[in-house]
Image (tube, grey):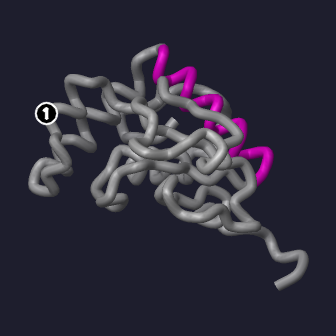
Amino acid sequence: MAGAAMTVSERVPLRRVYEAPAPDDGTRVLVDRIWPRGLSKEAAHLDCWVKDVAPSPELRRWYGHKPERFAEFRERYLAELREPERAQAFERLRELARAGTATLLTATRDVPHSHAAVLAEVLRSSLDEPPGGITAAGGP
């Protein structure tokens, strides 16, 4: 509907970086620490790469993309997002999303059980909050 306000989910879509860009992607942001295998920078059509918001290598290795560990992974990742470097990177994402659509991109195959899904959830819940960090509840 023309002139309708975007929903929070529309302002922060989540997609695989290997998918073709969509006209309504807005700012395309890669949120993985490691560059996607087999993808050129030109083919990615990125506006920016915010790798400092990704989980630590230690947490990523521990999780191993095992869905049965996702709940604990989510809690550990939320704790990492409170660390200064990641909190600063998160704030950059929030600024992008407040300015317009910011599509979060990840190379992971299981997007619903990824750090990017956690990040999108927290980012969406924080858009109307004042700048700050991540609170114990998972939001800013």
Q: Quadrant of the N terminus?
A: bottom right
For the image shown, how many numbered marks are present on the structure?
1
Callout 1 amino acid: Trp
Q: Position of residue 114 (x, y in %)?
A: 32, 50
Tell me if mark 1 has few (under 14), some (14-19) or many (20+) residues whose alpha carbon lies within 10 angstroms of its own.
few
Which portion, as a residue range, is magenta?
85-100
Q: Position of residue 103 (x, y in %)?
A: 62, 53
Establish if 121 lies above or below 37: below
Establish if 68 lies above or below 9: above
Which image quadrant for residue 126?
Answer: top right
Q: Kindly identify the residue that appears in the image at 71 percent across and 40 percent down.
A: 47
Q: Kindly identify the residue that appears in the image at 41 percent across and 24 percent down.
A: 82
Q: Kindly identify the residue that appears in the image at 27 percent across and 24 percent down.
A: 57
Q: Position of residue 26 (x, y in %)?
A: 74, 55
Mark 1 lies on residue: 62
Visible residue check, residue 120 = yes
Q: Position of residue 20 (x, y in %)?
A: 60, 64
Label 1 SS = helix
Q: Kindly identify the residue that appears in the image at 74 percent across and 45 percent down.
A: 98
Visible residue check, residue 128 = no
In magenta segment, residue 36: no
